Image (tube, rainbow, N blue to C red):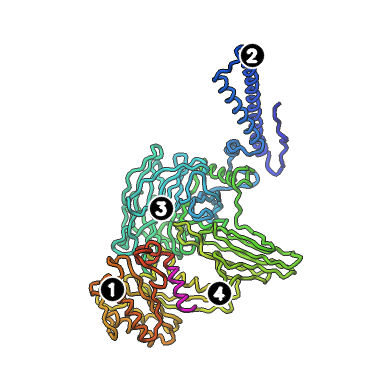
Amino acid sequence: MAIQLVTDQLSNVVDDKFRSQFVGNFKVTETTLNSLIDRQQGISREMVKLASDIADDVNHKISEQDKAMVKRLTEQSQELTARINRITRGADIDAIKEIIANLPASNSGVSAGKTYPVKALVSSFGGANFNSLDLYWTNDYLNFQPINKNVLAGTGTNVRDPSVAYFAGKFWVAYTWGVYWTTDLVNFHHLVLPRIEVGTNNWAPEWVVDGDNIYLLASAGSYEIWDSKADFKGYWCQFDPNLITFTAWSALDYTNPTGIATNIDNTMVKFNGSWWLAMKDEYHYGQADYAPKIQLYRGANVTGHFEYVTDIPFTQQCEGPSLVVVDNQLYCFTDGFASYSAWRMSSLDGMTWANEVEVKASDRSRTQHFTVLPLSDIKAATTVQQAVTYYLPETAGSGIASLRTSAPHLALHDGVNDLYPIQGVEYYYYLPSGQTEPVTALVNLHMDRNRGYSQIHFCIEEEQQPSTIQINHNGAFVPPDGVDNWQLHTPNQIVTLMTAGSDDGWNNDSAGPYQIINGNDQSDVETIKMGFLTDSFGIYIGGIKRNYIDYLSNDLSRHNCEVEAIRDTIGSTRLTQASDRSDSFCERISKFQPDLDYLLIQGGTNDWSANMPLGIFGDTKTTSFYGAIDYLIKQAFAKLPTTQLVFITPTYRSDMASGKNAENGQGATQTDYIQAIKTVCAKYNVQYIELGAIIGIYPWLNGSSLTVDGLHPNQIGHQRIARAIVSQLGL
């Protein structure tokens, strides 16, 4: 018996054209079901006949071939019956994909219930899936709407710096380090991307489409610190989408006006008859005045030569630029990596830039190192619309996509509430109004799914009954003063907690604990002004984003202390004064003002490695290490009379061939330089922190765990230093 549709009388919310098209889809489904049933009935008839023939066989012998045919027909019948049941329930994936693929595309979208005007596709990472690929659509180039909120089929969990393009009837995503392609934004396929230089860092491949010629830009190098040894620069190769082949990589032909090779993150677009190339320049990377720039160049063709034009004047520290032409304007989008934000500026001629505005994802996810692809191809725009429908089940009613909510409001209840916030989603937790008796919501935060920056909020909605939200102290939340819990009692007061995340997240480590950033009673907050006179320990070596000074500020903020840090931190500098440099600690201490609460002087390792004379106890000349320490203390006492002075001794370094007893050119060990600090400080009753012993860095055994190079601390090392300072100062 043929299956009939229940009804074709749809709501008048949609127009007649859509109604007829939608009914047509169900007619196709009806025909398919009837065909399947007819086929199943035919199989059943064949099975009956075959069974009868076998039963009538005079020898009552069943051949192996007959047995196999019975088994095969039985399995086909069972499979057909199961699929009919899935289609009836709306749970058959292939049928749903076919229906979605045949939905009519229009300028306004693909769904009667919700429309998606798509002008551009955005590829990013750093959202709820952290290092996985995130896709967004936009119709105004300012607000990004999420397409997927799960890991895409066929992709991995480490798709950093994704660049998306459309050519040869496919979407292509290049990332650090590989390529995916897809025809439907649902199923992705992987390609191996040849490396630029084996043994070097290869970063951020970016597509460039010049008619039928397809290029990839990328950057590579092994030394990024701002000096003459830096070797990071741009490269290009060509890609044939038909043969799936890449040419060898070649260096981009451009002239960096700084003369230092620290360019990464290339992007290019054709505008007003010229090719425009934007790159991040790591200006003064590794130095205290690090100030990354987005440089803009212009050339006649994709491979160069490019001449420098200007720096695009973003006010944020930015990277990962994406150049786009929209309505005869040149847009530059960037990742504001230092503030976990995203920005756009525009230009009518490429020379003058204005209108710096923040761009945001509607679900508050971080859009890290993203690219924007305008959709001029009708098929590409239609595919994006269909993908939106596929991934957001509320628009088409498909039962196979994963529903994700964004910026959710979640009610708390009386008793224990275990909460699992996710980076990029700004949760609002609240006690609802209308409680008939006092309520105490006990909150335990967890970081199991949280690796990046996020903010969450707590509030007691207005009510008659006195209620409490209590957030308990654990690894995910540290209350002010480190007490066991923190409580909110005041109705309609929104309290915000923030975690800065796990920095760059290469190791997928969990975010640091949440801290209260507003809504807390700040009346008793103490401001501490701290000066830092340091060598390279006070800057950002090895790609770290935060050092011990930053962590120190965070640690003290938990104790209602706000730190104002005054930094004079220069790599490779020494306490001792010598003729080859003019930036010794003795020459820089005069920069600090007497309103400091603390002055921390950290250094000495460069004095040992540069063979500065150790001197003897009692020296006062700044040309010996003993004398330099004596001079610094006397200068601090004279110019900073109310400032508490603290020396921090150097840690050992793994390049000491014979360990702690290694001697420099003066015949002195680093232990001798550490002892000099301790001896002179003891003479003047000045506090010192013997750093290596307190934080437990012994580079020959645990240097790979706590340092980036056997000397300079990694993130964990800097965190230990910050905790040691807080502890030793009694803060």
Of marks 4 and 3, the one in the foreground:
4
- Callout 4: SS: helix
What kind of residue is marked 1? Thr
Where, by quadrant of the figure, is residue 322 drawn? bottom left
What kind of residue is marked 4? Asp
Mark 1 in CB contact with mark 4 (< 8 angstroms): no
Q: Residue at x 52, y 76 (%)?
A: 561
Q: Is residue 61 left or right of residue 201?
A: right
Using the numbered discs, state the Cα–Cα distance from disc 4 to disc 3 in whole angstroms: 43 Å
Residue hosting label 3: 204
Q: Looking at the figure, which quarter contains the N terminus?
A: top right
Neighbourhood count class around disc 3 (C-alpha, 10 Å): few under 14, some 14–19, many 20 upward: many
Using the numbered discs, state the Cα–Cα distance from disc 4 to disc 2 in whole angstroms: 91 Å
Which region of the structure is painted magenta?
A: 718-731
- Callout 3: SS: strand
Of marks 1 and 4, the one in the foreground:
1
Of marks 3 and 2, the one in the foreground:
2
Residue hosting label 4: 481
Say which label, 2 or 1, has the lower sequence index.
2
Of marks 2 and 1, the one in the foreground:
2
Say which label, 4 or 3, has the lower sequence index.
3
What kind of residue is marked 3? Ala
